[in-house]
Amino acid sequence: MSLQIDVEHARSALIVRLTGELDHHSAQTVKATLEDAIARGSASHIILSLRDLSFMDSSGLGVILGRYKQITNKGGKMVVCDVNQAVYRLFELSGLFKILQIEDDERSALASLGVVS
Amino acid sequence: MMKHSHNHMTLSFASRSENEAFARVAVAAFVSQLDPTVDELTDIKTVVSEAVTNAIIHGYDNHDTGVVYIEATIEEDTVYLIIRDEGQGIEDIEAARQPLYTSKPELERSGMGFTIMENFMDEVEVETTVGRGTIVRMKKRIESTNAILN
C-alpha cells in the first residue's frame, strides 16, 4: 500500500520516479519530498516518470498540478512520461493533459528538454 | 445458472488516510468474483478511493476519530456501493459535484472526485445533511460477466 519516490538529478532536470500507489495518503509524502527537492535544488525542470505507478486517483492529479505550478513559477517545465492508460484517462477528464507535456519515456522526456544525461 | 445472483458485504474503519488503500483493495477483492476486466476493477478501486478520501478530508475534516462505512452488494451482474460518513455533510452539493471545484484548494485538491465517480460508474447519487453526514450510492454493471451469464 505504499509509494516509493526515487529522485535523480540529471543536470538541469530532476527525474522523479513513482513506484506503487498514489492516493491522498501517499500524495502528502510526494508533496513534501518534491517541494523540498525543487526549492533546494538547482534543477529547472521536472521529469515525472509514472512507469511503475500501479494506482492513482484525483489526489494524484492535485499533487502533480501543485508541482507543475511550483516549477513553472520558477520558469521551468514539467514533463510526464510513461503514462499508463488509466492515468491518462484521469489527465483527460481533468484537462491536465492540455497543460502537461507528455512523452513516451524518460529518454524522449530528457531529449525534449534538451538535457543530455 | 447464475453463480453470483446475490452477495453482500459491509466494512467500517477509522477515518485515517492509511485506510484508503485498504478500502479500495477490499472492495476490489469482493467485486472480483464477478470476473471484471482490469479496467473495470481499476474503475471500482478509483471511485472507492475518491469517496473514502472525501469522507476523510471533507466529512471528518482530516480527523481520524470518525468512522467510514462501506456496503457493497452484488445483484446478478451489477455492483452497488454505498460509502457513508457521519461527518459534517456538504453545504453546497451542486457546487461540490462540478468538475475542478474544491472547498479546500490549500490542500492541493484537484476537485475531480465526483466527476471521476460519475464518469466511472453508471449511476451516482449523493445524499448529504449538514451536521449529519454524507451517503454516496453508486452502481455499475460489470460487462465482462455477460459471457458467463449467457
Image (tube, coloured by chain):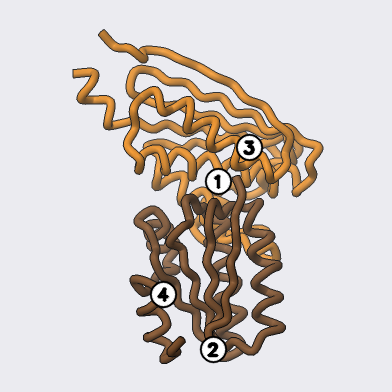
Chain colours: A brown, B orange
Dot 2: chain letter:
A
The residue where tag 1 is placed is B50
Residue A67 position, x and y percent, is 59, 74
Quadrant in the picture for residue A112 = bottom left
The residue sitting at 63% across, 53% down in the picture is A24
How far is mark 2 from mark 3, CA to CA?
Answer: 51 Å
* Foreground residue among B68 and B127: B68
Q: Is residue B127 visible?
A: no
Any mark on residue B35, and which?
Answer: none
Q: Is residue A33 left or right of residue A77?
A: right
The residue where tag 2 is placed is A11
Pointers 3 and 4 within a single chain: no
Kind of residue at badge 1: Glu
Query: Could you say whether the residue bearing mark 1 is in a helix, strand or loop?
Result: helix
Q: Is residue B12 left or right of residue B40?
A: right
Where does the C terminus of chain B fall, quadrant-wise? top left
Residue B128 position, x and y percent, is 63, 37
Kind of residue at badge 4: Glu
Kind of residue at badge 2: Arg
Kind of residue at badge 3: Thr
Query: Could you say whether the residue bearing mark 4 is in a helix, strand or loop?
Result: helix
Residue B30 position, x and y percent, is 48, 25
The residue where tag 3 is placed is B128
The residue sitting at 53% across, 84% down in the picture is A10
